[in-house]
Every structure is written in structure tokens, then in C-alpha cells.
Amino acid sequence: GGMLYPRDSESRETKELSGMWSFRTSGSDQDAGFREQWYSKPLSQTGPVIPMPVPASYNDITQDAAIRDYVGWVWYDREFFAPTRWRTDDLRVVLRFGSAHYYTIVWVNGQRAVSHDGGHLPFEADVGHLLSDGRRGNRVTVAINNTLSPFTLPTGSIEYKNDTNMYPPGYFVQNLNFDFFNYAGIHRTVLLYTTPATYIDDITVVTDVRDAVGVVRYNLTLGGRDLNPSATCKVVIRDKEGTAIAKSAGVQGEVKVADAILWWPFTMHPQPGYMYTFEARCAAGQEGVEDVYRLPFGIRTVNVTKSEFLINGRPFYFMGFGKHEDANIRGKGLDYALIAKDFNLIRWLGANSFRTSHYPYAEEIMDQADRQGVVVIDEVPAVGLHKENFAKQTLQHHLVVIEELIRRDKNRPSVVMWSIANEPSSNLAVSNDYFKAVAERARSLDVSRRPLTIALSSAAAKDVAHQHLDVVMVNRYFGWYSDPGRAQLIGRQLLACIEEWRNVSGKPVMVSEYGADTIAGMHMDPPYVFTEEYQVQLIGEYHKAFDVLRKKGYFVGELIWNFADFMTAQTITRVVGNKKGILTRDRQPKASAHVIRRRYHQLVNSSLDD
Ligand code: E9O
């Protein structure tokens, strides 16, 4: 299916299942829930359950370390009613999860409905035939396993500890090939929605601009039973005020929008993030029932030359950060208050862009990027790819994830580039075929042909991945992971490194990570690692080097690591999380935030001048 975001319309209805669900882990008996068929009865009849909010990660909700650190199957359930009017053959009822981490199986009234592999993208199933008739109501049961292996994305591994002097029998640890906490649970909205039995399954909109005329090419796919081969579809393009400004008919076509208002990043235009509505009406079934779907979209172009990143034909310089979906208590759970706060901070900082490090973010976040004119580098969860991960099985999953991501985000104007991995061991020869395959798949799936990139951390001379990309992103930690406390070396090291990447690749280059762990409120002068003074000093050295690189004409952006402090696994290299944020985890500025803010605002003003 097309996985269009569920939207109400005159032919569609949505019903959210957010709220308190029942929850339990499997304890130490991973198979128990399957052996005893916990999905066949209310979870509360299988043993003790606790209330668990949906959406949210389950890890930080309780006072129980066994739940915070749980590895394996956890179970959720809740009851719901479906309106009687939904009990008709003319309607399709779909159950949709915005995401659940990592591997998920869903039952409705004890019948298996859907399963999904991967923690960051939506999945859904038709459930109309599973719903009870009448007053008994319905039950949805969800089993989720957060175990990460060499073949999951992100990658990890389970390590059994066999030394019985040290560990009890059967003891194992979940190793992670990345530092952020492996939050798990039902992370995004769960909802039911209806469509007519024959419905609009997917819409693809690709835009171009020729002499101030917006050219909107579209393709509609229809789904459902009794599909009428001579189905009629009507398309209306509406402006922000809702006025119809262009029309078309048919399941595919091209519409011209005269004097198009282009979608611009908010740092480039006084009226940023302009969104049109693509309104599609299809009467595709034998009964002639009309399905209506309204897709927001923007008109803009993206192009990469040998040295430039162009949005609507104008050079774009990325100023922003890598982020995480991460916050106190809720973990990676969707939170509208947090989304609004983060976008207010993005604008306060003057950042024009962010990278969805290291996985696709919630659709509700992407909606704000579209509407507020914030540029997004959209990343798949391929973090931690090393030798053992360049296996067929990982690649197969990587290709599926790329497909799911592009299917979900292909119509978003904010998304200007796909990042197909983070810090892979792309110095290894085996990674060549791997990334060739992933890049080819991405290019064949994205009709609008957005550029591809990877956040690279290998040495330029040995890298085999960049040849498959359009833009080179580089993560570098001079003055932190190497030569800690020696900020005076950063300029020399960064310039040499970036020039080498340019020479080797011949492509636009940007820095996708740089930074230093900083404990808010810790001060020392002269600057010392972990103090606010050192973070300010370090980023100042990077900024001087960036300004030199900008004059060379191929350097296209700077993304600091990270927007905010975030939770990690427990290790001796992290003091209650990764502290490279310019904001604390509760979104208050460190001294560095003010430096970034001044810089980003100045860069925008100086580029508007020339
Ligand atoms: C990935 C990101 O998720 N890049 C890491 C960030 C970090 O703060 C992490 O949060 O650690 C940095 C990559 C570290 C490279 C280490 C190189 C060591 C060379 C001596």
C-alpha cells in the first residue's frame, strides 16, 4: 500500500487509540506470551499489568530498572469500540501505527493482523474483517521486541557471557553499534481510519519550475475491490486560502500553476514553507463512491552541481544540527509540546536545516519542517554498519527501509536529500557493492531524484562509498575524540581533511557532525574539556575554518552535533547521556547556543546582502 498519512475528509474518518494501554514484559521467559497465547485474552488475565502511555517509550515510565533496561518481548493491549456505522462492506477499516520499536506483531480480537520489522516507519493493516459486531467491543494486542542484531537497522548484537564466576547462567548483554539509548515501545500515534472500499492508495507529486510556472506532475494509485478500469479521478490544486487555482483529471497528469509561490526555507524568503493542497477525488469502484484525499505539497526544485547545493536555483548553505527524538520521561515517544518547542528553538537559533540522525522522525515532525520552511536531510536508521553488517540479510532490510522511507516522505518539500547511512565502515571493499545497491534502489524509487548522501567518518583516500553519492557529508571530532583540549589544532586538521575529501570526491562537501561533550553549568578558564568554555572555544575554531572553506566555493554546510543533550546506554564515556547538545536535554541554552545563534543569524544576513 501507499501508506498515505491518515487524514479526515468527507469520505474518510480517523479514530486515535492514544492513551493508557495495559503493559507487561515477558520477564525472563521470552516465549511465554506466544506459548500461552496472551493475545487470545485480555493481557490483565495473563498476569500483572501496569498502565503504559501510548505513544511513549516504556523505558523511563516506571521506577523499575528491569523495565528500563529490558531486552526482548514486551506486550501491550487495550480495548476500543468501532462505530456501528463502520460495519458495512462499503468501508475499509485500517489500523495504523506511526511506528513501534523494533519488531512488532499486532493482533485484533486474537487474530493476527500485521507484523513489522523496523522501529521508525509506519505500518498498517486492513482490520475490518477482524472487528467484532456490536456491543462487545474490540481488543488490540501488540507484542514488541527491541532486540537488535547484525541484521537490524540500527545494528547491534547479543553477547552471551559464559564465565559463571562472573555471570549467572544464561546472562547476556545487548551491544549497540551506536551511542543513543535504545528506547522502545509504541512510539507514535496508533489509529483506526476508514476509506471507501475502493480508495486512493497513493499519490506521488513531483514539482518543477519553468519561468515562474510551477509544473506539478502527479500519479495516483487506487486500491480495493471491484476496481473500475475506467475509474475517474479529479484533481484540484488549491492555494493556502483554499482557492482552486488549477485542475486536472485522470490518474496521472501534469498541472501548471501560473505565478507559483515557491516553497522556500525560512532563511531565504519572507514567506517560507508555502504549501499548496493537492485534492484528489476518485470514484474508482463499481458503486461510484468517491474517495477524497487532500495532500499538502510544495513547489520547489533541488539540484546539486559540482560545487553547489541549489534550492529553486539558488545556492543553499546548510546551517543546523543533527537531532534526536529524545526527551525526559517519554523517551522517543511523539510529543506535540516537544515538537513545537524544538521548532521554536530552531527558528530562535536561526538554523535553516537539520539531519534526522539516525533514523526517520515522526511524520508530525516532518509536517512542521514542511510548513515552517525548515530543510531536512532525511536519514535511514543505518547507523553502526561495520564488517559483519555488510551481509545480504542487512542489505535486504536496508533496501526495504529505503523503500518505506521514500514512500512515506517522497512528497515533502522540506526533504532535500536522502542520507542512506551514518558512519559506515566505508573503507572496506565489501561496502562498495552494498552502497551501490542501496544508492541504486534509492534513485530508482524517488521519482523526483533527490540527491543522496552519507555521513562519512572514514578517511577520504580509502573511502569507497562516496562515488555512489551526490554530496559528501563528513563527521569530524578534532579537538575532542582526537587531541582533546587542543582546540588550536582544529583549523589545520579540518582544512586538510575537508580539502582531501573535495579532491578525492570532486563533489560538494559539508560537515554533518562536530562538537564536544559539555556539562551545562560547568565552567573553567582557561577552557578545559567538558566545560561550557571549551565547547565555545572548540566551535569557534570550527567556525573560523568553515569561513575559510566557504570561500573555496564547494563547502555547502555545517551541522553541529547535537541540537540537545540526549540519553545513551550506560558506559563510562557518558555522564548520564551524550552532552554534546548546544541545548540541555530540557531545551535550555548552554553558552554555545548563543554563539551558534549569533553565527547563523549573521550568515543569513550576510548572504541576503550579496
Ligand atoms: C555519531 C553520533 O551518533 N557520531 C559520534 C557521536 C558522538 O558524540 C554520536 O553521538 O560520539 C561520534 C563518532 C565518534 C568517532 C570516534 C573517533 C575516535 C577517534 C579517536
Image (spheres, rainbow, N blue to C red):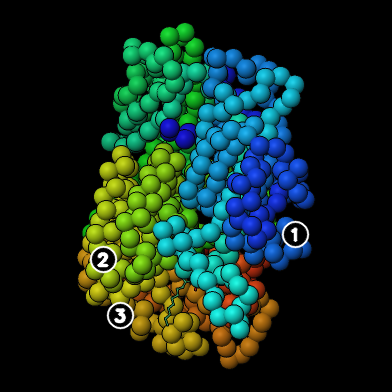
Q: Distance from label 2 to label 3 (Cα)?
A: 27 Å
**Which numbered disc, 1 or 2, marks the residue that appears first in the sequence?**
1
Q: Is residue 131 depicted above or below 513 in this figure?
A: above
Q: Residue under circle 2?
A: 430
Indicate the amino acid at tag 3.
Ala
Location of residue 589 in the rendering, given as x and y in whole percent from the top left corner = 64, 68
Q: Residue furthest top?
A: 287
Inspect the image, locate mark 1, and give the three-letter code of the amino acid beneath it.
Answer: Thr
Q: Amino acid at mark 2?
A: Val
User: What x and y, as percent, mark residue 222?
Assistant: 40, 23
Question: Residue 62 has which mark?
Answer: 1
Other residues around mark 3 within 10 Å, as few (<14) / some (14–19) / many (≥20): few
Residue 111, compared with residue 356, is above or below; it is above
Callout 3 touching callout 1 (CB < 8 Å): no
Specify the quadrant of the image occupied by residue 153.
bottom left
Residue drawn at the location 47% of the way across and 8% of the way down? 287
Quarter of the image for residue 499 reads: bottom left
Q: How many marks?
A: 3
Q: Quarter of the image holding residue 503?
A: bottom left
Proximity of marks 1 and 2: CB atoms separated by less than 8 Å: no
- Whole-percent x, y for residue 367 in the image: 53, 43
Q: What residue is shown with label 3?
A: 496
Which quadrant does the C terminus fall into?
Answer: bottom left
Q: Secondary structure at mark 3?
A: helix
On the image, the x and y values in percent for residue 5 come to 51, 35
Upstream in sequence: badge 2 or badge 3: 2
- Give the residue at x 24% y 68%: 429
- Residue 477 in view (yes/no): yes
Q: Given contact means CB atoms under 8 Å apart, are the residues at marks 2 and 3 in contact? A: no
Q: Is residue 575 above or below residue 293?
A: below
Question: What kind of element bears circle 2?
Answer: helix
Which of 586/577 is in front?
Answer: 577
